[in-house]
Amino acid sequence: MRLTFLKNRERRPDKIAITPLRVDVHSHLLPALDEGAKSLEESVALILELKQLGFHKLILTPHIMAGFYPNSPHKIQKHLLSLREHLAEKQIEVEIEVAAEYYLDAFFMKELLSANELLTFDSEEGAKYLLFETQHLHEPKQLFEAIKRISRKGYTPVLAHPERYNYLQRNRLLVHQLYETGLLFQVNINSFSGYYGSRSRELAEYLSVAQMISFLGTDCHKQEHIEMLQKTMVSPMYQTVLRAGEILNNRV
Ligand SMILES: [Fe+2]
């Protein structure tokens, strides 16, 4: 996986045509599982909006966080089935799958990483991408260990919205050290319009220019995010981002 990735990174951006994103890999649209969509109606309304933005496939990624969002794969799969049924009844054609956004903490390290059932989204080539997030302020002391253990289990670790973490905004060297481990970065689309602040925007742009972005995500929780996506996705900056490096969204 790592070797393929290094090869991908050598591609020149000017040879790559702009391809609109057909797949979103990060959102909170399964009703009432986290702080995202609160009802089935809200979920359907947001899914329709994402469809309008050109997405054909949505990978829904509820939080899994001990003490806050104790979601299990079984519970998430159950909610997926009822959402799919509801969409079919309404004749809304969109492909819906699930993974999760795992929070890196002691529970993740001790319990979840020891279990065999982890939710991932998968590539056509068979890679299993495990999306995880961390605390925002300080570098978690288990960060490198977590990457190593995720990789050893046969998954490809994907860090959700690295541009939003204070400890990465102020430490470019750490960004590069993480990248060199084989960790992939998933950047939020709305970061490019400054929705999460100027420091997030700066790091998102830095990652794009350095061709270090593997996935883009909406991280959509609510209507406000859709309105920002509508603006961001027609911006010249976003078109530049799609041209830079190898965005893997459409291959999962
Ligand atoms: Fe998220």
Image (tube, grey):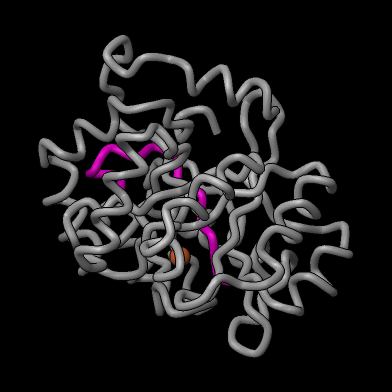
> Residue 129 at what x, y percent from top left?
64, 44
Residue 59 belongs to magenta span? yes
Q: Which residues are magenta?
A: 50-63
Q: Quadrant of the N terminus?
A: top right
Residue 67 at x, y percent in the picture: 65, 90
Q: Looking at the image, which residue is at 29% across and 31% down?
A: 242
Q: Specify whether 66 is left or right of 12.
A: right
Q: Residue 205: image x %, image y %?
A: 27, 45
Q: Residue at x 43, y 60 (%)?
A: 171
The image quadrant that residue 236 belongs to is top left
Residue closer to the observer: 122 or 246: 246
Q: Looking at the picture, how far across and down is residue 12, in whole percent? A: 36, 14
Q: Is residue 190 visible?
A: no
Q: Report the image quarter containing ligand 1.
A: bottom left
Q: Tell me the quarter of the image containing the C terminus.
A: top right
| Residue at position x 59%, y 55% in the image | 131
Please say whether residue 108 is one of the residues in the magenta stretch.
no
